[in-house]
Amino acid sequence: MISHLEPALREKLERQAVQDYYDTLVSARPEIKRALSMESCWRHYIRGGIKRWAFLLPLLATMGLPAPAVQYFLDQFDAFVRTHVTIGGKGGAIDEALVPMPGI
């Protein structure tokens, strides 16, 4: 969703998409609900997206991808972060301290 949807459309659809994913997961394995709430699933979606793209963007930039393509993905990632991460009191629902650097 981060890379292929316009940010406004992603913002409109992503919460319901994650809810549908969670509902399907719990429907298939009800015991998961005891270990994973919808809110926790939502936070995993946000943190996971940030971690993966923070790791992937530098790789894309060094793999010969044309500069306009790298910029496109950077802009998509930037929009996602601005939607979901509170930085300096501005932004979304996840505080920057809760999004650590990805492990290697």
Image: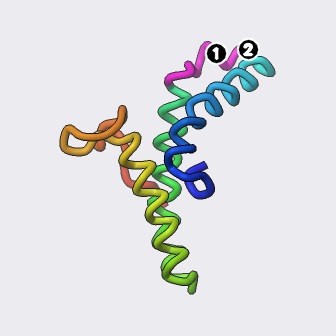
Q: Report the disc number at residue 33.
A: 1
Q: Residue 37, located in which quarter of the rendered image?
A: top right
Vertical arrangement, residue 61 with respect to residue 94, above or below: below
Q: How many marks?
A: 2
User: In the image, 63: left or right of 20?
Assistant: left
Q: Position of residue 92 (x, y in %)?
A: 35, 36
Q: Is label 1 in a helix, a strand or a loop?
A: helix
Dot 1, how many residues are within 10 Å of its Cα: few (below 14), some (14-19), or many (20+)? some
Horizontal side of residue 51 vs 90, given as left or right:
right
Distance, label 2 to label 1, CA atoms, is: 6 Å
Q: Residue at x 67, y 19 (%)?
A: 32
Up-down relation of residue 31 to residue 20 (above or below): above
Find the magenta span and give its range: 30-39
Q: In the current view of this chain or complex, which residue is farthest to the bottom?
A: 64
Q: Is residue 48 magenta?
A: no
Residue at position x 52%, y 30% from top? 42
Tag 2 and tag 1, C-beta contact below 8 Å: yes
Label number found at residue 101: none
- From what the image shows, is residue 90 above or below residue 39? below
Residue 99 picture location, percent across and down: 37, 44
Could you tell me which residue is drawn at 50 percent across and 49 percent down? 7
State yes or no: residue 32 in magenta: yes
Is 32 on the left or on the right of 89, as rendered? right
Q: Amino acid at mark 2?
A: Pro
Query: To which quarter of the image does residue 101 belong?
Result: bottom left
Percent coordinates x, y for residue 84 in the rendering:
40, 40
**Which residue is labeled 2 in the image?**
30
